[in-house]
Image: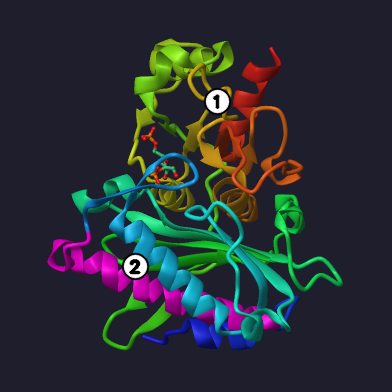
C-alpha cells in the first residue's frame, strides 16, 4: 500500500503559513507522547484523581497534569509560539523567553478531553487551536488570546481510542492520520473527511433533560417520537461523554452533538469551553461540511469574553443543525 505520512502530507500541502509544518509536527510528537502515557493505563499508576481542582473547579486526574506538561514542553521548544493557554491553567503559561522571543502564534489546548473516561479505558483526546499572535505583541496577555474561532490558522484533535488518530484542518478540508506504532508515523488514512448532510443520530446527556430549555426539550422529544412523530424518522442515541470521540464519530458517520446551556449551567454560560473545545471542533465540523452553532449564532463568530468562557454547543450534520435552528427561532 502506498502510504502518505504526516511529514509527506505537510511537505506537499499548500499551507497558508509555512510555519504550520513545524507547529503541526510538534503537536503530533506531543500527542504521541500523551498516547504512550494513556496507553500504559493502570500500569503507570497514574489513573487516579489528584487533590487539586483546575480553574473550571473540576478535579484533575494525574493524567490531565502529565498531558498538560508534555504538551507545553514539547510545543514550546519549536519557538513558534509567543504564548500558550490550556484548560488546566488559570492564566496563560509563562514561557521561557528563549522560546517565545520570535514566536508569532498562540496555542490553546485541552490536553486530555473526556478525562473522566480515562480510568475506564474509554476514548479520550487532546484538542488544540492555533491563532496568530497580534502584531507587535511579544508578551501576550489574556486579551491577545480572545480572538474569534474564525481567526484560527489550524485546529484539530488527537483521539486516543482503539487506534491513535490525529485529525486536523488548516482551512483546506479535514484530514485524519492514524498512528502506525511500528514506524511511529502518523499515516494519512482519512483524507478530506465529510460529514453526511442528513443523519438520524443524536448525542446529548439525557440525564440533564429536566433542566433543558424549551427548544431543546421539543427537538429531542420529536427525535424520540421517531417515525410516528413530526420528523418522520427513527433516531438513534449515543453518549460517550468524551467530546473528541463524539466529534470523531460525527466526522465518520454523521449525527449531531449537543451540550446545551441548561438551568444548572446558565450562570456559567454552558459546559464546554469556547477557546479550546468549541472553536476548534466548530472549525473542523464546518470544514467537513457540517454546522456548529451556540443556538443563536455560528460558534466561529462568537466574540470571546474570557479564556475559559463556556458556551452552548450544537454541531454536526448540516440538515439536522438547520432543523434545530427552527426550534430556537420558533
Ligand atoms: P470531561 O469533563 O471529562 O473532560 O470537556 C468536557 C467533557 O468531558 C466533554 O469531553 C464531554 O463531552 C463532557 O464533558 C461530558 O459531560 P457529562 O459529564 O455531562 O457527561
Q: Is residue 289 visible?
A: no
Q: Is residue 112 visible?
A: yes
Does the beta carbon at disc 1 come under 8 Å from ligand 1?
A: no
- In this rendering, is residue 220 above or below 72? above
Q: Is residue 221 or residue 260 the one in the foreground?
A: 260
* Eye-nearest disc, 2 or 1: 1
Question: Residue 245, image x and y in percent?
Answer: 38, 50
Q: CA distance from mark 2 to mark 1?
A: 31 Å
Q: Is residue 61 or residue 195 the one in the foreground?
A: 61
User: Callout 1: few (<14), some (14-19), or many (20+) C-alpha neighbours within 10 Å?
Assistant: many
| Image: magenta residue range | 19-46
* Circle number at residue 164: 2
Q: Which secondary structure dominates the residues rendered in magenta?
A: helix
Which residue: 29% across, 58% down?
62
Residue 2: in magenta span:
no
- Contact check, label 2 and label 1, Cβ < 8 Å: no
Question: Residue 58, image x and y in percent?
Answer: 40, 41
Is residue 42 toward the left or the right of residue 223 in the image? left
- In this rendering, is residue 75 above or below 161? below
Question: Residue 93, image x and y in percent?
Answer: 58, 65
Q: Secondary structure at mark 2?
A: strand
- In this rendering, is residue 2 above or below 164? below
Q: What color scheme is it?
A: rainbow
Amino acid at each position: 500500500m502506498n502510504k502518505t505520512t504526516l511529514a509527506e502530507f505537510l511537505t506537499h500541502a499548500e499551507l497558508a503559513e509555512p510555519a504550520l509544518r513545524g507547529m503541526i509536527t510538534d503537536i503530533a510528537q506531543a500527542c504521541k507522547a500523551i498516547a504512550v502515557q494513556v496507553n500504559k493505563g493502570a500500569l503507570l499508576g497514574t489513573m487516579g484523581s489528584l487533590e487539586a481542582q483546575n480553574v473550571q473547579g473540576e478535579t484533575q486526574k494525574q493524567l490531565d497534569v502529565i498531558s498538560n506538561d508534555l504538551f507545553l514542553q514539547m510545543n514550546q521548544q519549536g519557538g513558534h509560539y509567543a504564548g500558550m493557554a490550556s484548560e488546566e491553567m488559570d492564566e496563560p503559561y509563562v514561557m521561557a523567553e528563549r522560546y517565545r522571543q520570535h514566536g508569532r502564534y498562540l496555542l490553546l489546548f485541552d490536553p486530555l478531553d473526556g478525562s473522566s473516561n480515562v480510568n475506564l479505558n474509554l476514548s479520550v483526546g487532546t484538542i488544540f487551536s492555533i491563532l496568530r499572535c497580534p502584531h507587535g505583541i511579544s508578551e501576550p496577555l489574556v486579551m491577545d488570546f480572545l480572538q474569534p474561532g474564525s481567526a484560527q490558522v489550524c485546529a484539530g484533535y488527537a483521539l486516543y481510542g482503539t487506534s491513535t488518530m490525529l485529525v486536523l484542518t488548516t482551512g483546506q478540508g479535514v484530514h485524519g492520520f492514524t498512528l502506525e506504532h511500528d514506524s511511529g508515523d502518523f499515516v494519512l488514512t482519512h483524507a478530506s473527511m465529510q460529514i453526511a448532510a442528513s443523519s438520524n443520530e443524536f448525542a446529548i446527556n439525557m440525564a440533564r433533560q429536566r433542566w433543558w430549555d424549551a427548544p431543546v426539550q421539543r427537538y429531542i422529544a420529536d427525535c424520540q417520537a421517531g417515525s410516528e412523530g413530526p420528523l418522520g424518522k427513527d433516531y438513534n442515541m449515543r453518549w460517550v461523554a468524551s467530546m473528541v470521540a463524539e466529534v470523531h464519530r460525527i466526522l465518520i458517520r454523521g449525527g449531531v452533538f449537543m451540550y446545551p446551556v441548561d438551568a444548572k449551567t446558565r450562570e456559567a454560560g454552558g459546559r464546554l469551553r469556547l477557546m479550546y473545545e468549541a472553536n476548534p471542533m466548530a472549525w473542523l465540523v464546518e470544514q467537513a461540511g457540517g454546522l456548529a452553532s451556540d443556538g443563536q449564532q455560528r460558534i466561529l463568530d462568537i466574540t470571546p469574553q474570557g479564556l475559559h468562557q463556556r458556551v452552548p454547543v450544537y454541531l454536526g450534520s448540516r440538515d439536522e443543525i438547520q432543523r434545530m435552528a427552527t426550534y430556537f427561532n420558533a
